[in-house]
Image (tube, rainbow, N blue to C red):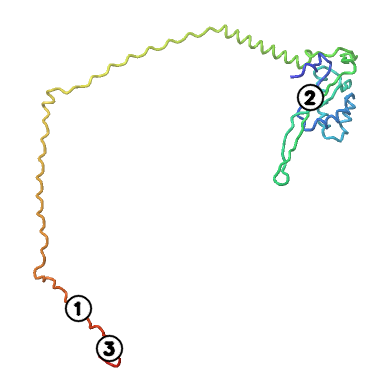
Amino acid sequence: MADKRFNFANTGLVRAEARHVRSSARKVRLVLADIRGRSVIDARKQLLFSPRAVAKDIELVLRSAVTNAEVNHGLSPDDLVIHEAFANEGVTIKRFKPRARGRASKIRKRTAHITILLRSLSGGTVIETTVDGTTETVAPKKAGDSARSKRVAASKKADGAEVATDVAEVAEKPKAAAKPKAAAKPKAPAKPKAEPTEAAAADKPKAAAKPKAPAKPKAPAKPKAAAAEGTAEKKPAAPRKRAPKKTDTPDGEKD
């Protein structure tokens, strides 16, 4: 939304602005100082031959301001002068770069907001050419008389008419009567279970019980095997004979 302080109806100035331009505000101010107070033609020549890179961004803002004055307010581009041009600081983008011994150093990438205000040398008068070929000086168009404002007003009027017709059509249409709900079908009574009669139970003979199989007789236990006959009793082992011990004999004697 445009600031009311720079409204054309109040000040007679045409405004254009560019935000977040990737340049520092100090560098932009150096170029704006050269074009401030110049006509649009001279300012464009100055920006065309400027060695600074930000001059291209400033030239775009100037072109936008001239277009606003020509299209929205009917001012002649040759009659415009740069009344004011200034730059404000924008957001600073922070980055880092590696340095020695594992440290980091800051990088600050500055941005700027550029604003240009134009005014007409003829006091806001506009020279128009009639059908006969003669020139005529008329008052500048007001904000409400611009082509864009007329288009906006016409579209709003059309939208309002469409809304009114839609409301009228909705009011005229009678509401459709609600359809009656279908009556619920009665549930069929549950069929009673057939109970067995006493006569039918008496007619059915009971199944005869099967006879049990006789138990098998157990086999007699096998007797343990007796010791074999004729086995002699173990005789005690005979004592071993000991060898006679060697006794000491005198020297020179033999056994």
Q: Do the residues bearing badges 1 and 2 touch, measured as CB atoms within 8 Å?
A: no
Mark 3, Cα crowd under 10 Å, few <14 / some 14-19 / many 20+, is few
Mark 1, Cα crowd under 10 Å, few <14 / some 14-19 / many 20+, is few
The residue closer to the viewer here, 106 or 143, is 106
Asked if residue 220 is positioned above or below residue 46 in the image, the reply reads: below
Q: Secondary structure at mark 2?
A: strand
Amino acid carrying mark 3 in the image: Thr
Looking at the image, residue 138 sits to the left or right of residue 220; the answer is right
The residue closer to the viewer here, 99 or 120, is 99
Location of the N terminus by quadrant is top right
- Asked which quadrant contains residue 155, the reply is top right
Q: Position of residue 80 (x, y in %)?
A: 87, 21
Foreground mark, 1 or 3, reads 3
Q: How many marks?
A: 3
* Residue lying furthest bottom: 252
Q: Position of residue 153 (x, y in %)?
A: 72, 13
Per the model, the C-alpha gap separating discs 3 and 2 is 145 Å
Amino acid carrying mark 2 in the image: Glu
Instruction: Give the residue pinned by disc 2.
Output: 17
Instruction: Give the residue pinned by disc 3.
Output: 249
Mark 2, Cα crowd under 10 Å, few <14 / some 14-19 / many 20+, is some
Looking at the image, residue 231 sits to the left or right of residue 94; the answer is left
Residue at 29 percent across and 93 percent down: it is: 252
